[in-house]
Structures are given as structure tokens and as C-alpha cells.
Amino acid sequence: MVQKKILFLPMILCFTLTACEDWFDLSPKSELKAEDLFETEQGFRDALIGCYALMAQPELYGATLTYTYMDVLSGYYTTASGSLNAFRYAYEHDYTNQIEESRKDDIWKKQYNVVANLNCLLERIDEKVDVFSANNYELIKGEALAMRGFIHFDLLRMFAPSPSSCIPSIEDAIPYVDRYTNQLFPQLTVSEVLKRIIDDLQQARVLLAEVDPYGPRHSDFDLENLKGILKGRTFRLNYYATTALLARTLLYRGEEYDKSQAYEYATEVIQSNLFPLIGSADLSSIEQNGFIQENIFALEYIGMKEELIDVYFYVPNTSSQMLAISSTTLNNIYPIALNIDYRKQWWLEESGSYHLVSKYNYSERVPLLKVPEMYLIATETAPTLELATEWFNLLQHHRGLPNEELSEVQLKERLLKEYTKEFLAEGQLFYAYKRMNIDKTPITDTPLVNPKAVYTLPLPEENTFFVSD
Amino acid sequence: MAHKNLFHRIVILFLLISSASGGIFAQSRPQDKKVTLNMQQVTAAQLFKTVQQQTGLDFIYNVKDLNLVTRFNVSATGESVASLLQRVFKNENFTFEYSENTIIVKPIPDCFSVRGQVIDSATGELLPGANIRLLENPQQGTVTDLEGNFSFSFVSHDKHPTLVVSFMGFEDFTQMLKQRTEEIAIALTPAEQQMLDVVVTGYYNQRKESFTGAASNYSGEELTTISNQSVLHSLSALDPSFKIVDNISMGSDPNTIPDIQVRGTNSLPDASGTNLSEQYKGSANLPTFILDGFEVSVEKIYDLDPTRVSNISILKDASATAIYGSRAANGVVIIDTKAPKSGKLRLNYYGSADFEVADLSQYNLLRAADKLEYERLAGLYEGSDAIYVQEEYLKDYNERLKLVRQGVDTDWLSKPLHSVGVGQKHSVQLEGGNDSFRYGVNLTYNQSVGVMKGSGRNRLGTSIKLQYNYKNLRFKNELSFDNVLSKNSPYGNFSVYTYMNPYYSPYDEDGKLKQTAFQSSNPHLGSQAIPNPLYNSILNVTDSSVYDDFIDNFSVEWNILTTLKFKGNFSLERITRRNDTFKPADHTDFIGTDTNKGCYAKGSTVSLSYDGSAVLSYFNGWNTHTLSLNGGWNVQQTSSDYDSYTVTGFPNQQLNHPAFGNGFEEGSTIVGDAQTTRLMGFFGNVNYSYSNRYFVDASLRADGSSQFGSNQRWGTFWSGGLGWNLHNEDFLANDNINQLRLRLSTGYTGGQNFYAYQSMLMYQYQSRLTYQNYIGTIIKTFGNDNLKWQRTQKHNYGLDFALFDNRLSGYVNYYIENSKDLLADITMASYLGFDTYKENLGETQNKGYEFSLKGTIFQTKDWRVNLFVNGGHYTNILKRISSGLSSYNKKADAAGSTAPYVRYVEGASINTIWVVPSAGIDPATGNEIFISKDGTYTNKWSEQDYMPYASTDPKLSGTFGLILYYKNWELNSNFYYRFGGYAYNQTLVDKVENVDPYGNVDARALKDRWQTSGVAAKYKRINDLSKTKPTSRFVEKDNLLTGNSLSIAYTFDRKLIDKLGAERLKVILCANDFMRLSSIRREVGTSYPFARHFSCSAQLTF
């Protein structure tokens, strides 16, 4: 009798033990375990949204990699050279100064942090195809792959020499991090990294082609009234953004075959007509002064005006971070003869003897890829001079400028000038000079003794280790 | 003695007789000799004498045996001796042995068989493990089983053998047996002042006689003799390995919960500081506290009424702690509260009046005139060559000089302090009931008042204990509720007062407190308003926190068989805590701000925990074997939910509620967190002892926790130990050795005092991650699924002894603790996306010894004088550290602290003081000269020259004291000592060299700093305002002697108080922290002063 009673006690214990692995699975309220998060489609979406939010941080594309630091490097802002300005060492391309070293190291770390977040998502998405409804698996995976390519491409453009300035197949570049791990990665060559980026982008493009409302099948969708997970894809890394990015990447690699491909991709984006260039009629409202309809991929930052724009481009807040353009510099960007340029009229504001960037005053989006670049890529890669001039004049027309007949040499020269005008406060000019391996500084045209030292930011010293092979 | 002499005489007689009459009767057998006699009412001895006269045969016998034979009548005619003796003594237990001329009378040994039960006469509780011994032969005996029952069979020549029943903690009891089979009930009386003979492990009790672990037991009485304030302080005075970490800054603040270490530090700090929430910092070495079987926080113990405690055990080594598995690395402290006693309704009252007096003897600040002179010498008024500027400086100086001349010399230190802080304490306990039902009700009120005006801690508590016995079942339930309100002084931080210049006056012309003590305008500082901290005291300021703690503790004991027992326990605790800080618009914090003056910060935490356990115990003893087996299961869960916010803009100081604020602080949101942790464990223990001489002990626990990676959820911890009771060995059977026990043990325990979810790959949602109206989520920590439990291997070698009739007793323990798999931050390659991840990498080693010695040096009927001393020493080595910690050194170097900081270097101790060696102050220039690594002298301080200069570990530290009893008087003293260690005199550097010359400074800044060339000085040039970095010049010997407690108690005679209807009345006068002698002169209690504590209390029982 008693014996029986004693036996039942261990039985309870055994029963409890078998159920206890679940019993130990706990999470705090504001946090979620990765395995629990990726049980639902929403979890994947939230993790992807988190990556966009990370990219939009001021230390990344929210400011540093677009209208502040990157454009200080390309010499837009005259005030940055002031001895009290926070960017004075960046203006001189002195990357070894302590502040600048930590600034660029921080970019490196934060970019790779986004990559880690993407890898964590990508490593789990294939096991969880079942949790997705409709075509959302392709959409999220495609977007994440494109973003991984996007970030690696910008890291490559910052921290490795351009293919035109080196032998890309032997020049050491950066690691291509495609797994969520604490294991080390090898340092790949420029060619290898570019190949990996293009592979990711191609894969993303294939995934998105059939399902993205901003893709070849856009006519099947009511783009004005997208719902659910499709909402907001207008300026995210959609099919056309991926295609445009491929065009940009291929042009950067710059091999003969790449150029014709880049041309195809650039024109595909243009011809979708989803990102029309601005016209004189559109310029009636101040909301359009950022030309946001031309954005293919942009990052949204709510409160950008108060938190960031006013810090750098607002006179009453004049501080050591003030970024303004002197009249001389302005005339280098937009020649006086072409005062009618829409961009000069809409993107700048006069303030005494300086001009301040005003293109973000009414927009909370920072463009990362926009359709004018596709026109410029088409111009640069067009099979004939005739076609090239045609693309070029199309863009000129939408900037309020007259058509021109140009020779091949003239066109190349004008192309670079066009980058200077078009990408004011967007952080792309520096890369354009670097891509073309120009041994002069942008805008001021000062000759560079050691262009490589200016265009290639040093890798972070501390804690950067690679696998030896 | 007497019969021994007799025996001798008989033998001698026999020898004489046999030699004289040898050969006469040699031919026939002695027993065949014939006798003829007729005697009335004779004793056996008389009969033997007659027989001897007739036959010449000698008798050898024990007089004592014969005395038991009653007188008898006998007659015989020519009967043989053998037949006669056979006939006469047939009812007596004698046998007769015949040799040539002698008859040896031998008693036949008796077989006895006794059964019985041993209980505690006070509580009626059964006493398992009590010792039952035969007085004539202590080697023979048995012990009581789990139910307190025993059965004991033995053989004795003694007709009425005597049993001795002993159980430590109780008076010995002797019982003479009247019959050969007997059933007896023995009630033992508890002996005060004696250590209990059981080791309380929380889940079950073990006999100390066969326990291999290192554990110390203290009774509630011992604790309250030291201090009526906090159990923690009393324990640190009693046990050499239980230490309260020095808190120079917080002094005697009643609201600072002490940090405790048992046998030193075992964990590595978190170098990244990113993943850990603040609350885990600094407490990684706290032991686990178990109150009535339920794990509680150190704060709960801090607030526990010491008079409620019945017994405390500190479990130190692996053998003692292994059954706590993952929570045992830092030691375990088991606290049991008093159980209600049966009997008529009894009322116990304890009341005391407590007095706090600030101890400012270490402060030595400058007076008004000297302070201004110091400022002048420090060069504060020599700014510039420009005459205009120089005039401004002079104006500022004259402004201050005017105040000095006016005779303003404010003693700021005394302003925020009570001359005497008076608190009180009352505790009432009602108890009663019978053997089947007992109850106890407890009510406590404790108002402790700090020396700073307005600071204090009010504790109000009540509990109800019920106990019900039914057949072999016993149910117990305790319900307790505590409310603790802690208030911080509206006067603010004490250090502010130490910086106030004496020539500032807190009052305006009308004698009213002003908001600004001084308006300075100095070209160097600009215009500056010096706030008057006293002004805040007249405002409606709130700085308090209150918590309600509700605990229900239910247990059931089931004696299934006499040898088998089941015990189940379930506890539930709910704590709600609220913090309120309110500063109205007029508060000096808002001088210079125009908008949103005034703020209210409010925070609240709710936590709920439960703990359940089930233990099955088997205990059995045979003649020479004792075996005990325990096995159990334990489960616990803790969840907490916390939020806080700050509201600003309170124009009206009377409207002190968040609802009356203008809005949230700019950019702030409500912060909070909610989390749950779970733990489950299975454990078992075997204890076997052979003939009370040799014994072994083994324990095992498997713990699973929600805090660990899914791949390493379960951890297994074990221990094993051996022991030898030398005092039970024949070769040491000596009246002077009462106890001599050797113990050794080893095993693994674990630690988990850290942030719960750092091991996992966690995603966090945050409002800042809002993008396109979705809330995004990102990875919070890298995560490591392979993270395992920290493990500490503990070796312990111990010796317990009691000598000279227990007049000298004590123990010695030597231990080595190797902590492995300590969680450490590993630096990651920067492209992997995170700075660090957690890995089981660190290793530390602690080695040390501890001893305790108690002796009764003098004892008469009225007097007893006891002396005790205990002490310990330990060293720590970092055996392996992570790259994260190495780079922490670099980061710390770069931060350029003026205080020495822990540098993590393999092979060094965590307690090393790292400084740059100094050759002193150059008498020519007043600059300090440093000795660089290559031995050269330099003026430049450099972190390259850091040296492990000295260690803060004392060579020996502990307590000693004297306890004196005279009739009803009792005097108790307890002193703390430490010597051989070093300390960096941080407060001296900060008050003499790293001073803010615009605030008040130590007198030595004026007197002992270098002023004139050629005159040697202790401290650097008076007008050198640079900060002194860690230098060996301020490393000082840290020898300390403090008076923990001194008390005098008087217990009134029963006869005197009988008229009042009282049973017991004891009055106690007690002084705590009454003395402090230190080799270092430094300010102690910088943020809150140290205080001396006096109390006058009475214990009354009706």
C-alpha cells in the first residue's frame, strides 16, 4: 500500500521532466527569441523592417553616408574646411585623425550589423517557406538579398580601391559576410566581392521579377492602393531598385560586357515609367522640391527635418556642424550661365554669402537610387554616341536645360559635371570620381598626389581579422 | 575505587592463605568439599565466610554484586559446596568458577532491550539522530531514526544499566533502567549556548556527527546578542568567511543594502557593460539566501527582524552546498524562523529604543579664514597680467574676505545631521496550542532613523504560523506580510556639505534659509550661483521607496515509515515596489533653468515568485552503521515587471503628484522591462557512517534553467566527502578530547548571477525602430546556444575539535576554489556585426583558510568567562581572462581615471592595486617624481608604468571578543580586526590633491602641501591644480580595529517578576560600531556619514 504511494511520486517527476524543455523557453516582454520570431510571416517582415530602420540611422544613410560625411568627402560644403568644423579632417581626407577614424570604423561596424541582421533572417527563411502566404516569401527574401548586396557594395566602394585604379582580381578588399556566425571570413579581392554582390542581386531580381508590384508585372497591380505587406514598396528595395543597383554595380565593375548589361538594366528601369522624371508642371508645389517621384530606392526618416536637417542646414542653429556652400563653390557646381537649372532653383536656399541645402526641407526621404542616375548610366553605356546623346538630352530637358550636340570627349566631361549637379547632398559624387579614377578632387578640381589614399578609406585597425587563406 | 581496594585485599589474602595451606586439600576437587551449617538472615558475604572457615576455600567476588542479594536463611548438612551454592543462589545471576583453592563468584550478564522515543521537551518535536549510549561502555549505542524512535539491545553485567541520551543543543539526559525490557520516552531540554548537532541544509537535516561539509550554525540568540539591527551585520561579526563589503561612500545609510561575500569573489565582471542591466552589477558574488526553505533577496534578509530567527546556517564548501547546484557557487545561507511552542498561550515582547550618533571624527576640514588662505595660495586669484582682469579677481577675493572678516564660519557638516537619531522597535509574538495544533502570531514594527535628518527605514511586518499534526502527517503554513518604507534625506547627498565653503552662510539677513548660498563672479568661472543644499530641506521634497512583500509558505511532512519521510514545500512571494522622487520648482537643482522646473520620477516593480520542492528521506541505523538517503525535486519561477517615467514642470510644490506635471521630460518615454526566469532541479544525497568513526557523504544535483542556451540547458553538480571522528577511536579515548573530527570534501557547484537572456539570440522591438508605420525588430545580442553553467570546483579540508570537557572548541578550514567556465566577453571581428559575445572562458582561483576558536577560560558557580577569536585569509588569482577583459584595460587606461581600477591580467589578483610607483615629492619644485618601468625617474605620469603595487587582501581578518557571565549578568563584546592589506586612500587624494579648490578641502591641503622650495612636503605643490593619477604615494597600510558591539544584559530573577505575571525579563544595553582605530586617516562615509549605534532593549515573556 505504502509502496504504491511512493512509486507514484517519481512518476510525477518523470512526467514533469519530459515537458520541461518547453517550460524553460521564456522571453522577456520587449524581446523575442529568434526561433519564436521566425515562426510567422510577420516576424520575417518585422526583422526586414528593422534592417531598414537600421540603415536609416543618422550614422548610416540617415545622414553620414548621404548628405553629410560622404558629401564633405566630395567637397560640396565649403564651411567644412573651417578650423572649428566637426568635419574639418574629413574635408582634408585625413582618415587617421582620431575622430575620423572612429567615424569610419563606426560606419563599418554598423553596416555589418545590418548585414548580420539580414543573414540571421536569410538563414532561416528557407526552412520556413510554409509560414508565408501568397508570394511573400519571394518578396522578403529578394529584398533581404538585395539589401545585403547594397550594403556590401557601399562598403566595397568605401574601403577598397575602385576596379579602374587597380588589378581587381588581386587587390584585397573586404570580406563578404553571408552567414550569421562568430567564425572568421576571408578577405576577398575586389573582383570576388563584386561577383558575390552581383550574384546576390541577380538572385534577388529573379525572386522579385514575378511577384513585385514594382516589377515587370506592375500593370497587374493597383499601385495606388497596395495593401498589407505590399504597402510601402514604392521606394523600398523592389525589383526595379534591384535592377537599378545592378546597373550601378556593373558600371562600377566596368568590364566591356558589364557595360552592355548595365545599359539594359538602366533602360529597363527608365522604360517601366514608374519613376518619371520631374517636369515643369510638377514643380508648382514645394512638396516636390526633393523630386521624390524620381526615387527608386529611398530611406524614410520621420522627423528628419527637426532632428538632422536643422542641425546641418539651418542658420539659426549655426554650429560646428554647419554645412554650407559658398558662392564660388556653387558656381563650380552649377555654372552661372545655367541659372535656369531646376536643381539649383529648388534644392538650394541663399543665406547671405552662402547657400544651404533645402531639398530635404519638405521631404523625409533620403534617395539612395533614383532614375536620373539610370539616364546617366544609359548615356555612359549606350552602344552609340547618338543614343548616348539622346539619353543625356532627355535628362537635360527635365532639368530645364537646352538640348546639346556633344562629341564623345565632351560627353564624358559633361557626364561628370552632371553627377556633380544631380547628386548634391546624396553622397554619390565621391564614388563617381572614384569609379572613373579621376586624380583631381571633385568640384574644386585640385590635383591629387595620391588619389588612392583619398578614395580608399583604411580598413578598421582594431579587431579586424581575416582568415589567412 | 572502594571495591577495587577490596578486590586487591581479597587477592592478597587469597595468596597468603593458599601459600600457607597449600597441599592439604590438593587431592580432591574444591567444589566437592562438604559443609554443614545453619544460618538465619545472613548476607551472601557471611555465608561465604562460614564456608571458607569450614573448607578453606577462598571466595573472590565483587562486593557490589553481593550487596544486591537480600538476606536469606540457609541450612545444610554435609552438602557439597557446589550443590549448596547452586541451591542458595538459584534465583540470582551468579555462576561459580572453581579453581584449586578459590571460588570465583561471577554475575551472569543480562540482556537488555530498550525501545523508546526522544523528543524536544520544549516543542514536543521528535529528535532524529539523537545519540543513545551506555554509560558503562560508550562504544555501545545507537541513534534515533527520523521519527525520533530508537530500539537498542545490549548485554550488561550491570543489573540496572544507565543510558545516556545526548543531542547537541540539548542537555544530556541519563536514565537508569529498572527492567530488562523497557519502553521509555525521553524528553530532552534544550541547552542554550550550545551548537545544534544538526546541519540544516534547507531541504533536510544532516547529523553534524557524520557531516563532511564546512558549515557554521548560529542560533537566533547569538545573533541578537551582537546587534538588534540586522541579521547580516551580526553574521559578519560571527563568521570569518561571511563578509560585508566595505562601503566607504554610503557609511551608515539605513537604505543601502550591504553587499555580501562568502569566501571572496568568484565571478568576473562584465567588461562590455552593454548587455547587463545595472542591478546585476556588483552583486555577482552574493550568496544565495534561503528563508524557511524559500529563496529570497538579500534585501529581505536585511529587513528581517533578528528576534524572529531561530537558526542560521552558512553553507560554504561543495559538500554543504552541492544540493543547491547552480545557485551554490557563492555559498548558501539558510535562515529558519522560530516555530511556535506548544503550551498555554504565551506572549513574548521585545522592545528597544535605538540611538544613532554620527561619527565625523575622520573629517578634518578647513575653517573659514584658512580656507580662503588656501584659495589664495592655490593661485585662484592670480589670473592674468591684464590689470583689468586682475582687478576682477581681486574683487572676487575681497568679496569672500569680507565674509570671513564678518565672522561667517558655518559648520556645514552638522547642518543635515541629527545630534542623535532616535528610533524604536517593537516585536510581539503570541504562541500556544497543543501537540496536534499550534499557532504563532508575530507583529513587528521597526523604525530605524538615520543620522541624516529625514532619512530612515520603517519596517512593519506581521506573520501567522500554524501547525497541525494528524497521525503521521504534519502540516505547516506561514503567512507573512511586510511593508518597508525607505526615505532618503531631503537634505540630499552628504558630500555636498563637505564641499561647502565655511565662509558661505545658509541664511539671509532675516535669518531665513536662502536658495543661493553665494553668488560668485570670478573671471575664471564666470558668474556662478552656489546652491544652498539646506534650502531644499524646507521644500516639499520626496525621495522614497516602499515595498510590500507577501509570502505564503506551506509544507507537509509525512512519516511514511519509521525510516522513511516525505516533505513537500510550496512557497509563493509577491513584491510590489514603488519609487517616488519629487523635486519642486524651487529645488536648487533648477537654479538657472527657466522652463519645466520641478520633476517627478516614478517607478514601479511587481514581482511574483514561487518555489516548490519535494524531498524523500530515508534514515536507518543499525548497531554500527548509520545510513541516510535523501532525494528531491525543486522547481522555481520568478517574474518581474518594471516601468518608470519622469514628468517635469511642477510650479506648485504642494501638488506633488505626477498628474500635476506639465508633461514628460523632453525626449523621454516610459521605460520598462518584464521578464521571467525558471529553474528546475533534481537532487540526491547519501550519508553513511560506520560505528560513528568513519563517514562518507555524496550529493548530486541536476539543474535546468531558462537562462541558458538551449544546447546546454542542464547542468550537473556533485560533491563527495570523507570524514573521521577521531574522538570515537579507542586510541584517543581520553577525557580531554571530546571531539576531534577530520573532514575533506570536493565537488562542483554553479553560479548564475547575471542577466537572464544574454545567452540567447534575442530580437528586440523598440519604438525607435518604427519604419513606414511598422515596428521593426533587430538582434539585441549575438547569442550563444552553447553557453554553459559557470562552475566552481571547491575543495575543503577541515578539522573540528572540542577539548577539555568542551571548554575549548573550534574549527579550521582550508579551501581552494577553482571557478571555471566563467562567462566572459569575447571580442568579435568587427565585420561580424557585434562587438562581443559571451563565452565560457574565464578562470579564477581562490585559496584561503578560516578558523574559529572558543574557550571557557574561567568557570565557577557564579562566573563564566568565554573568549573567542576567528579569522580568515584568502587570495585570488585570475587564471584565464578573455580578450574582452584585456581590451577593457586599454579602454580604462584611455579613460584616465584618478582612482585605481581593476586591471585584468592573467596571474594577477582581482584585488591588486595598480599604481605608478612614486619616489615622492621633489622638495625643489613640489612636483611628484615617478619611477618608470626601466627604473629611471621622471616627472611624467604614464599608464605604461602601471605596477601591481599591493593587494587589498588583508593577511588576516576576523573578529574576537569576550563573553562574561556573572549570576544574572551577561557582558558581550565583539571586535573586528584586519591587518596586512593595503588600500588606496582615495578620499585623501580627492580631498587634498584632486580637490576642487573652489569647494572646501581637507586641512592637509593647506598644511602639508608643498609651498616653499627646499622644504620637503608630503603632498604636491599647493597651486598645482592638475589631477593626481593613481600613484603609490597614496597606497597605505590598511590595518583596522573596530568595535562591532558591546552589550550588557541582565535577566531578572523569576521570583521578582512573578508578581507581574511574567516568566522572563531581560534588559540589554548595546553599543554598535562604538570604536574605530585605523592605520589610514581618511574620510569615511562620504555620501552618508558613518554612525555609532546604541540601543536599550527589553525582552519580556508572559
Image (spheres, rainbow, N blue to C red):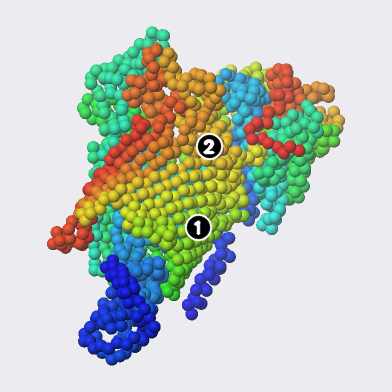
User: Can you see residue A356?
Assistant: no
Q: Reading the chain from its start, which is encountered first: label 1 or label 2?
A: 1
Secondary element under disc 2, as helix, strand or loop, is loop
Q: Residue at x 78, y 26 (%)?
A: A165
User: Disc 1 versus disc 2: distance between alpha carbons?
Assistant: 31 Å
Residue B446 left/right relative to A341: left
Which image quarter: residue A427? Answer: top right
User: Can you see residue A50?
Assistant: yes
Instruction: Answer above or below: position of B164 versus B766.
Output: below
Q: Residue at x 48, y 48 (%)?
A: B815
Frontmost residue, B93 versus A122: B93
Secondary element under disc 1, as helix, strand or loop, is strand
The amino acid pointed to by label 1 is: Gly
Residue at mark 2: B908
Chain assignment, label 1: B
Q: Residue furthest bottom?
A: B77
Residue B605 left/right relative to A320: left
Instruction: Answer above or below: position of B311 versus B245.
Output: below
Q: Residue B926: percent from the left, percent from the top?
A: 42, 16
Residue at mark 1: B721
The amino acid pointed to by label 2 is: Ala
Q: Residue B385: percent from the left, percent from the top?
A: 41, 9
Chain assignment, label 2: B
Q: Residue at x 45, y 69 (%)?
A: B624
| Numbered circle sitting on residue A131 | none
